[in-house]
Image: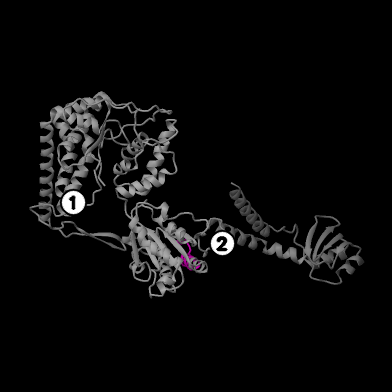
């Protein structure tokens, strides 16, 4: 607020001064000095006020006017001889400082205003407009960094890879006496939320060395050469504080392939990258400065960054497995009061595909649920509700649905669940609900028993049949079709196409890739057609065969298990949500047990509007 007012005040002052400079008073009458002296001699001038070389003339009759004296040293004597009253000092000289300010003031104000705006464009940091080329890296000294490897879990192999960096920073002679050279740069690669930044801070925390942290986007500015200057300044500061660690987060913002764009800011980015390459290649072997960078897009990095001598070591920080998820949960559970019934191992098994950030969010959501219910500790029920919210979205209990819509949704979700329970290699069904969640009117949730690394043909075929279970149930039991299966069809079609064109899982087409190749150029992505029209027709026919066969399988399973589908629909209409135990009771022919009463909550339900149904089994890890 005050900054904006100050800016407009400066703008107004500059404009006022400029206009004032040109707003000089005009003479009321145009009188020459010779005519003035003739009038004085003729007695027509009554009084003259002398102000330097400016003469304010008061005639005996008429309006006052001003003229400029040509420097006549006899003027005052002549005027007094003619009887003119003279006042002022004829030898007054103007104040030089005032004159300088009067003429140079507008220029100084404009220059000051320009520096002020440049400082604002740079975020008002220290140095303002004079700090364009200064590094924006934030320094965390060894005493302020309390993060150690004890705070990093779920990536044991990555910690082992970088642990030798700690040994080198503590005792470099151990490596140098054998002729070893520590890598100048270490690139941490992995999906978002897996703890790459935390791991970099832990290296500095374990080694007790300064930690310079900066983002790749901090090097990019509108002025050409600023990024390269900041790179130089950052490395100079790092060498003064060596041994230390420089951490560059999201390095792909500045380290992309050179020559992949045209003009503009691309030239500035390439200059920044070139300077970074030079600085890293110019390290001395005993400088004690290690560059650690993080990215989830290593495929777009320039090859010069990855060559030996720069980022010559890549450490993959992947999604944690079941044991890693358990360790991460235990780290985050230290910060909240946990009920004794909470089992981190059970939660880890139920969260395949979760990253470290996802697990931290799970613990936080569970704590929020416990706070809403006025509990003193977080129990297993809170974690289950938090997991359901993250996987399937928040419940929309206030959404108004007609009974016919609820019944149709129940048949759709029961079709998914029954097909999944009958097929032998499908993941166990964890929960089925017709409670609207997120954008879906109902959800069937399958929970893998273990982390999945590869996909196999028999399991993928069963997943296709499960996806078609919803539409097959609508046709078998309702004799109609709805739009609720649109998402199921999209996923099934993509999976079948990948099986034929990418994975070589077609008996008729064989082990060959039938996908058009893509390449990048300065004009963007280009697609090169490598599949003929005749072959593409065979590919489409094979995809059609896969889809039709699995749809027929899903329909056959539902027709053979009509009683189980009807029983599950009745239970869903009564309780809206069925857990794994209730589903097993139905599939074994027993009446489903009653659900546990939900805990009382302090706050009411949030309103929502039902969206298009997207039921079916969620994507597996």
Q: Report the side of 128 relative to 50 (left or right).
A: left
Q: Main secondary structure of the magenta part?
A: helix
Q: Position of residue 279 (x, y in %)?
A: 44, 70
Q: Nearer the viewer, mark 2 or mark 1?
A: 1
Q: Report the side of 117 relative to 607 (left or right).
A: right
In the displayed structure, 224 sits above or below 353; it is below
Q: CA distance from mark 2 to mark 1?
A: 55 Å
Foreground residue among 195 and 97: 195
Q: Looking at the rendered structure, which numbered label has been put on residue 83?
A: none
Foreground residue among 515 and 578: 578
Foreground residue among 471 and 376: 376
Q: Secondary structure at mark 1?
A: helix
User: Which contiguous range is marked in magenta?
Assistant: 219-233
Foreground residue among 11 and 48: 11
Quadrant hosting residue 202: bottom left
On the image, numbered disc 1 is attached to which residue? 498
Residue visible at 34% across and 54% down? Answer: 155
On the image, numbered disc 2 is attached to which residue? 129
Nearest to N terminus: mark 2 or mark 1: 2
Whether 184 is among the magenta residues is: no
Q: Position of residue 84 (x, y in %)?
A: 89, 62
Quadrant hosting residue 551: top left
Quadrant hosting residue 332: top left
């Amino acid at each position: 607020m005050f900054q904006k007012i100050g800016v407009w005040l400066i703008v107004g002052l500059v404009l006022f001064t400029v206009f004032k400079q040109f707003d000089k008073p005009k003479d009321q009458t145009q009188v020459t000095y010779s005519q003035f002296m003739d009038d004085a001699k003729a007695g027509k001038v009554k009084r003259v006020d002398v102000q330097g070389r400016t003469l304010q003339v008061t005639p005996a009759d008429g309006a006052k006017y001003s003229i400029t004296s040509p420097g006549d040293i006899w003027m005052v004597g002549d005027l007094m001889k003619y009887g003119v009253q003279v006042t002022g000092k004829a030898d007054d000289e103007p104040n030089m400082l005032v004159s300088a300010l009067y003429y140079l003031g507008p220029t100084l104000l404009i220059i000051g205003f320009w520096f002020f705006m440049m400082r604002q464009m740079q975020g008002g940091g220290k140095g303002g407009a004079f700090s364009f080329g200064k590094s924006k890296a934030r320094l965390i000294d060894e005493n302020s960094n309390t993060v150690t490897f004890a705070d990093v879990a779920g990536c044991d192999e990555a910690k082992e890879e970088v642990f030798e960096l700690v040994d080198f920073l503590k005792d470099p002679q151990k490596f140098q006496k054998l002729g070893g050279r520590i890598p100048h740069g270490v690139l941490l690669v992995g999906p978002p939320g897996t703890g790459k930044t935390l791991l970099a801070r832990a290296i500095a925390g374990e080694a007790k060395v300064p930690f310079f942290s900066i983002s790749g986007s901090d090097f990019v500015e509108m002025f050409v050469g600023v990024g390269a200057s900041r790179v130089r300044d950052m490395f100079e500061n790092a060498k003064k504080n060596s041994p230390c660690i420089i951490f560059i987060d999201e390095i792909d913002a500045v380290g992309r392939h050179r020559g992949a764009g045209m003009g503009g800011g691309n030239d500035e980015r390439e200059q920044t990258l070139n300077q970074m390459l030079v600085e890293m290649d110019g390290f001395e072997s005993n400088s004690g400065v290690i560059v650690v960078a993080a990215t989830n897009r290593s495929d777009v990095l320039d090859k010069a960054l990855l060559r030996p001598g720069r980022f010559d070591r890549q450490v993959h920080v992947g999604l944690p497995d079941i044991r890693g998820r358990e360790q991460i949960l235990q780290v985050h559970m230290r910060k909240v009061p946990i009920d004794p019934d909470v089992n981190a191992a059970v939660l880890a098994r139920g969260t395949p595909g979760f990253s470290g950030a996802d697990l931290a969010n799970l613990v936080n959501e569970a704590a929020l649920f416990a706070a809403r219910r006025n509990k003193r500790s977080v129990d297993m029920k809170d974690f289950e509700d938090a997991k359901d919210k993250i996987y399937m979205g928040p419940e929309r209990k206030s959404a108004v649905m007609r009974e016919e819509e609820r019944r149709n949704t129940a048949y759709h979700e029961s079709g998914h669940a029954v097909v999944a329970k009958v097929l032998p290699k499908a993941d166990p069904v964890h929960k089925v609900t017709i409670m609207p969640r997120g954008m879906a009117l109902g959800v069937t949730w399958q929970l893998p028993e273990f982390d999945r690394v590869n996909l196999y043909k028999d399991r993928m075929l069963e997943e296709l049949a499960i996806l078609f279970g919803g539409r097959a149930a609508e046709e078998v039991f309702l004799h109609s079709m709805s739009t609720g299966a649109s998402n199921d069809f999209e996923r099934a079609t993509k999976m079948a196409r990948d099986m034929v064109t990418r994975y070589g899982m077609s008996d008729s087409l064989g082990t060959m890739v039938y996908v058009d190749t893509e390449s990048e150029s300065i004009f963007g992505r280009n697609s090169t057609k490598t599949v003929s029209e005749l072959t593409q027709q065979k590919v489409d026919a094979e995809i059609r065969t896969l889809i039709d066969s699995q749809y027929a399988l899903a329909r056959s399973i539902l027709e053979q298990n009509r009683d189980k589908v009807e029983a599950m629909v009745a239970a869903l209409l009564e309780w809206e949500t069925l857990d794994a135990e209730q589903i097993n009771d139905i599939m074994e022919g027993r009446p489903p047990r009653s659900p546990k009463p939900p805990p009382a909550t302090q706050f009411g339900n949030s309103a929502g509007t039902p969206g298009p149904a997207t039921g079916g089994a969620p994507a597996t890890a």
